[in-house]
Amino acid sequence: MKKLVRFLLVVVLAAGIQTTVKAQAQKFGHVDSSEILQLLPERATAEKAFQNYMVELDKELQNMAGEYQSKLADYQANQATMSALVKQSKEKELTDLGQRIQEYQSNAEVEAQKKQVELMEPLIKKVQDAVNAVGKEQGFTYIFDKSIGAVVYLGDSAIDITNDVKKKLGL
């Protein structure tokens, strides 16, 4: 029985030592993905495409607003001479157009966010793939991204791999 207890104690201690050694062998790093994204040449193309999309959305909104202003001015100029039925019809038309404008604005915001995600997703994936490659090549256990506030403490021994990822991407 004593031999079994000693044997189990030795096994537990050996496992504990291995765990301690493995924990000490972990390698941590940090990266600033935002800085890297800003340096990607494709970012300018994505931003230009997004700006063009926003101009297109804004142009349509301006057309709708111009139509509303034109119909409102016409209504205000002629309302004294309109019959009650025509007046009611014009007011309904203005109300409906105002609601369409508000709906368009809401939809445009949602679509703009979708477009921005669509354009940035390949760039983010490219940076993530490079971070993964550097992490694997250099044997990191964890890499934290400073740009999204994922670092709560940054010790003196932390290694910044931002330059390694830039080099991997040819930046």
Image (cartoon, helix red, strand yellow):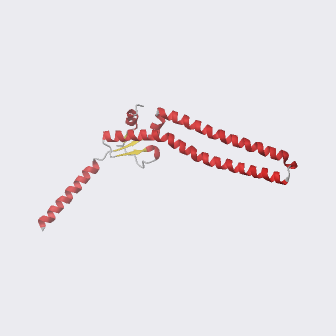
- Residue at 67% of width from left, 42% of height from top? 61
Q: Is residue 8 above or below residue 112?
A: below
- Residue at 82% of width from left, 51% of height from top? 86
Return the x and y of residue 68 as percentages of the image width and height: 74, 45
How many discs appear? 0
Residue situated in front as seen by the camera: 14 or 68: 68
- Residue at 46% of width from left, 43% of height from top? 147
Q: Is residue 140 above or below residue 41?
A: below
Residue situated in front as seen by the camera: 97 or 136: 97
Return the x and y of residue 69 as percentages of the image width and height: 75, 43
The N terminus sits in image quarter: bottom left
Return the x and y of residue 50 as percentages of the image width and height: 56, 38
The C terminus sits in image quarter: top left
Residue situated in front as seen by the camera: 157 or 99: 99
In-image side of 37 versus 102 (left or right): left
- Residue at 59% of width from left, 36% of height from top? 52
In-image side of 148 versus 67 (left or right): left
Residue situated in front as seen by the camera: 10 or 39: 39
Return the x and y of residue 142 as percentages of the image width and height: 35, 46
In-image side of 90 versus 148 (left or right): right
Q: Residue furthest right?
A: 81
